[in-house]
Amino acid sequence: MSALIAAVDAYLQRTAEARLDELQELLRIPTIGVLSDHHGDVRSGAEWIAARMREIGLEHVDVSETGGHPVVYADWLHAQGSPTVVVYAHYDVQPVDPLDLWVRPPFEPRVEDGRIYGRGAADDKGQLHLHLWAAKAWLATAGRLPVNVRYVFEGEEEAGSPNFEAWLRANTQRLDGDLVVITDTGFYEGNHPAVTVGLRGNMHLQIDVAGPSQDLHSGSFGGVVQNPANALVRILASLRDGEGRVTIPGFYDDIRELTPAEYDTLARLPFDEAGFADEIGVPQLFGEPGVIPQVRRGARPTLDICGIWSGFQGEGTKTIIPAHAHAKVSARLVPDMEPRRIYELARKAILAVDVPGVDVEVSLEDTMHPFVVSVDHPAAQTAARCLEEVFGSEPYYIREGGSIGAVASFDQVLGKPAVLLGFTNPDDHAHSPNESLVLANYEGGVRTVARYWEALGST
């Protein structure tokens, strides 16, 4: 350990209580970006972060306007001869429903049993906040950072980053850098340190089936009118076979298959199928036959119904043929699957299903491209060494099954390598009631980032 890192660690030890108090202050701001009632709160959250950046000593702080919620930008660019890192996290959070399942109101954070609870604790305010304190610790102890850093904190990630790519393209000059570090991921099962080297993309569509002009009596009209709900069920059933394999023609054609080394990296991940099934409350796991779960979770494509609605859903019975039926369908994609091509294939397959007597429409909701970086990339290897130094265990390299719109945007606009260095515990309940972040992960995250900056600055 260098003398500078020792000083940073000592500073972080002295300031732990103040850091936790400040994190709770940030968590109290209900930055729910997808709800219009909270748009003012999102702006308040952005201004709060900008104020802390100025206090720390970061420069060119800007609450930068987009077509929606602002991006908070700041930088520190005085490490001559050292690399420049672009850091990404997001400050918007998910809605909090159902409220009755929260032990305590979601924006009244509590610290209990080594965790901090509250909406955004893990996804992603806690992780954003640790970057502020890694910078603060370096500037307070050494008066400088070991690398040049540009901070980009988004306010629309939970909405799919609809304005982020346009903002990137408009701000490429002040995003010039050698590496992108994205902190919106986490550790592996058992809370084992991990570096994420891949994310799946996403294609989200909606199916709308319209039948009669209004709901009809199922006794008077049953047998002579096509039921839109029945038609929709037939359409949805046609998209996958009984083993979970997607049946859309051409769906698997463009997949970049794993190399033997990539497969071995995932296959070596410890995974208890029975224990995992028990933890999430299902009798057994299910998925593409012949593919192990470690690969299915992040390196194979999927297609799932995310929502379906039609007809009467109240208490008791109501004998009707509903006038319409709807479904939202999501496909998770892997390299080199092009989201819009997958949409066109899916749309063609849906409209080809023979369901006479109804009108079927298919519309594209959103897309995200998949992302992967080699585990052998020096920036990923350096991140892994810093994680091991702080947490005491050699980290795993994992592929995350979810999607982060900003990752693909950085890849396409900046064309720079990216390291997904996140610290959340797998049982963080992100997007769910009682979200939490293990404080050891948070504190270790601050120290890992501090070491990572030094390691990158010495290369």
Image (tube, grey):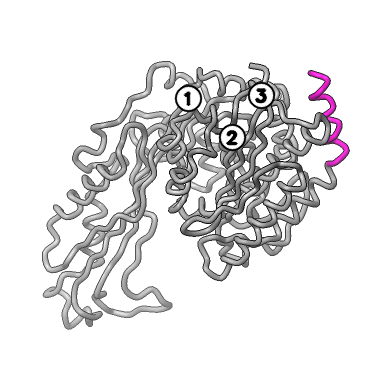
The range drawn in magenta is 1-15
Q: Which mark is residue 177?
A: none
Compare marks 2 and 1 and give the one earlier in the sequence.
2
Q: Is residue 3 magenta?
A: yes
Secondary element at tag 1: helix
Looking at the image, which residue is at 52% across and 33% down?
A: 176
- As measured in the structure, the alpha-carbon distance from the residue carrying label 2 to the one carrying label 1 is 13 Å
Residue under circle 1? Answer: 266
Looking at the image, which residue is at 31% across and 73% down?
A: 311
**Tag 3: amino acid:** Gln
Q: Is residue 238 magenta?
A: no
| Rendered view: 19 above or below 415 | below
**Residue 33's spot in the image, x, y percent?**
54, 60
> Is disc 2 in contact with disc 1, using a CB cutoff of under 8 Å?
no
Compare marks 3 and 2 and give the one earlier in the sequence.
3
Q: Nearer the viewer, residue 109 or 454?
A: 454
Callout 3 crowding tier (Cα within 10 Å): few <14, some 14–19, many ≥20: few
Compare marks 3 and 1 and give the one earlier in the sequence.
3
Looking at the image, which residue is at 79% across and 18% down?
A: 2
Whether residue 117 sits left or right of residue 34 in the image: it is right
Q: Nearer the viewer, residue 301 or 235?
A: 301
**Residue 452's spot in the image, x, y percent?**
67, 26
- As measured in the structure, the alpha-carbon distance from the residue carrying label 3 to the one carrying label 2 is 40 Å
Callout 2 crowding tier (Cα within 10 Å): few <14, some 14–19, many ≥20: some
| Rendered view: 101 above or below 413 | below
Residue under circle 3? Answer: 80
Q: Nearer the viewer, mark 3 or mark 2?
A: 3
Residue under circle 2? Answer: 189
**Tag 2: amino acid:** Glu
* Main SS, magenta residues: helix
**Tag 1: amino acid:** Leu
